[in-house]
Amino acid sequence: MPSRKITAHRLPGARYLLGACALLACAPGRAIDGMNLSVERFAQAGIEARGIELALRIPDARTLSATLRIATAHLGADAGIVRNLVVQCPALIAQDFLYRCEDAHIAGRFAEAGLQSLRGRLEWNQRLRRLRFAAAGLTLAGGQLNLEGEWRAAGWNLRVNGSALGLAPLRQLLGKRLPALPSLSIDGRLAMLSAQASGGAQLAALTAEVRLEGVSLGNPDGSIATDQIAAHLTLKGTRQAGRWRFESELNCEHGEALAGRWYWNFTQQPLTASMNGRVDSQGIQLDQARWQLGTFMRAAGRAEFALSGKTPIHSLALDIADLDMAALPTQTRDGLLAGSPVPQLQGSGHVQGHLEIENDAPTIADLTFAKLALEDRRAGLAVDALSGRIRWQSLAQRKQALADSQDTQSVLSWKAGLLYGVRVGAARLQFTTASSDVRLLQGTRIPILDGGLEVRVLQLRRIGDPAMAIRFDATLDPISVAELCKAFGWPQFSGTLSGRIPDLALEAGVLTLGGALQAAVFDGTLRVQDLRLSDAFGARPRLDANVEFSRLDLAAITSAFDVGRITGRLDGRIGGLELVGWEPVAFDAHLYSTPGDRSRRRISQRAVQNISSIGGGIGATAALQRSALRFFHEFSYARIGISCRLKNDVCLMDGVEPHPPGYYLVKGWGLPRIDVIGNSRRVDWPQLLATLKELPESQATVGKSP
């Protein structure tokens, strides 16, 4: 009987294809030497194929070959579409409802992977309705993938192994399947990939192990960058009720990273992290996460993040097991502190704590410090052995803590410190803090140089708000002025500084004193009354006050400045003092010899010349230059004094008594006698300031009346 071909069209399902295979395999002799079949559509277990054609051939009595063509195959939303798929099997083995092809050639356009030509194995078990497959040599992003898997009516699974995949071309191929990373360049390679996935209509489970090498990221402005990152990542995920549950581990042991001011060298301080949680289209929930950043930090936490909306952090709880300040790399520290008031801050000691955030707002910060040492020598700031615990809470959390009778007190202590070069001794602060408020719970003494500050009241409310409020009451125990000047790098003064700071308050941006501010300076007394500071933290703060001082030692004052020597005592008052932007705009000042003072009153030749230049007179200078007076270094005087009423940048000047048409600035006494006479009544204030700054070198006369 001659051989013949059978052609079938529009068969309703795959079972007819398999039946045809069985028919050919069992056909006696060569009654049938070929068969062509076609199926319009096949859909099962998440796969939909259209335009299916199967050609079966029996070249000889021992050989059965097959060619399968599929116009389009939708492999599900997670895998994409395969087009123009051609599977050629030169030797199809059919036995006991088992069909195998050991050397299949597979070609087609595989979604983002593009046109491929592969070698593989296929096996169909008709009884179990199971398809097993394997393919090698799939080229993707410059690397290769090997696939192996199984398909059943109930679902499928796939195993993938790959190597040397370029991240840049991989990102380009996958396109919109990846999260949007605008303007972020990427380079490097996926050195190793081992993954297994399973599912049905959708991907249901995934496990993966990835090895990344030479990863470099960057954005145009350079604020985000990595170089030669090497990392090992494992991931396990399962889909449940529309959400993914996942577990992951990350080890990054090589390379560098920069994010804003934060820099890290993973080669020196590797990162290890593990996380598990859930993710869906709405957000990410971390049930448990752990991080270790070299020897610098160990932490654990849980969190919930939104992928959209105005509050990306729904909740965050972070437990810092240890933060070792000494282990913070120098480059990281320098980057974080660049441009700050403490660019060279160095530290040691340990920090532990617990932090919580809800709806993008911090709610709890419970931090413990253990012998923390911080120092910036250039800034003159330091603290040694800072220890204690800060318990900060939002107002809602504080109310709940008080209702639960929880301890809400904070305590900080230190062994020594440096405040802008001024030595500070050991002290202990006990306080409470919530929201933007801080309140000292009991008085304390802070040693300062050879004195100290006795603080009775300290309360700050709404810190950082324009409506910030402060209450402060303290006494300053005597501090050596000489030690203070040395610390600040000022000319040396003698005497002590002490006084009372009574009930200082800041309300609605206005700083006031509940009484007079008193201080002991230059062996005399200073009293500040009616102090009022407006817009204290604005661009142009305004200060109003009335100042009085008595029995100041002129020898102590003039010894601190190179303007000549004067002895005696000085009284004075500065009424209606008004500063705007810390520059004087108005005052009524009177400085004069202390009435009834019996101390020795002497003035040096240099001091005479400088006072003469201030008052606009040249008589004293001329007398010193042209007479025998130039041979005397000091002179006695009866009284000394000056007054200035400043208004509209004009200083109305006067002295201790009239000397028509001028006034006495220094009225001499005894022999040899010299008088300093001022002639200018109306003096330009900026010019007067310039003259004062030039003393003692300049002896120029203050200009004429404006």
Image: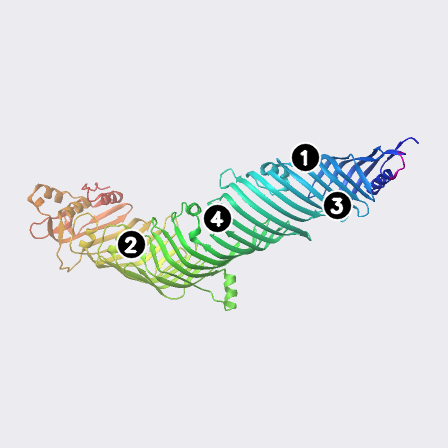
Q: Label 3 sits on what residue type?
A: Trp
Residue farthest along the top direction in this orientation: 2
Alpha-carbon span between mark 3 and mark 4: 45 Å
For the residue pair 652 and 429, the one nearer the viewer reads as: 429
Name the mark nearer the viewer: 4 or 2.
Answer: 4
- Say what secondary structure mark 4 lies in: loop
Judge whether residue 662 can be spotted in this image: no
Name the mark nearer the viewer: 3 or 2.
Answer: 3
Alpha-carbon span between mark 4 and mark 2: 61 Å
Q: Residue 695: name its quadrant.
A: top left
- Residue 293 sits above or below residue 10 on the image: below
Question: Which residue was labeled with disc 2?
Answer: 576
Q: Label 2 sits on what residue type?
A: Gly
Name the mark nearer the viewer: 1 or 2.
Answer: 1
Alpha-carbon span between mark 3 and mark 2: 93 Å
Tell me the number on the disc at residue 151: 3
For the residue pair 22 and 250, the one nearer the viewer reads as: 22
Please provide percent x and percent y for residue 294.
Answer: 48, 50
Mark 1 in CB contact with mark 2 (< 8 angstroms): no
For the residue pair 693 and 84, the one nearer the viewer reads as: 84
Q: Label 1 sits on what residue type?
A: Gly
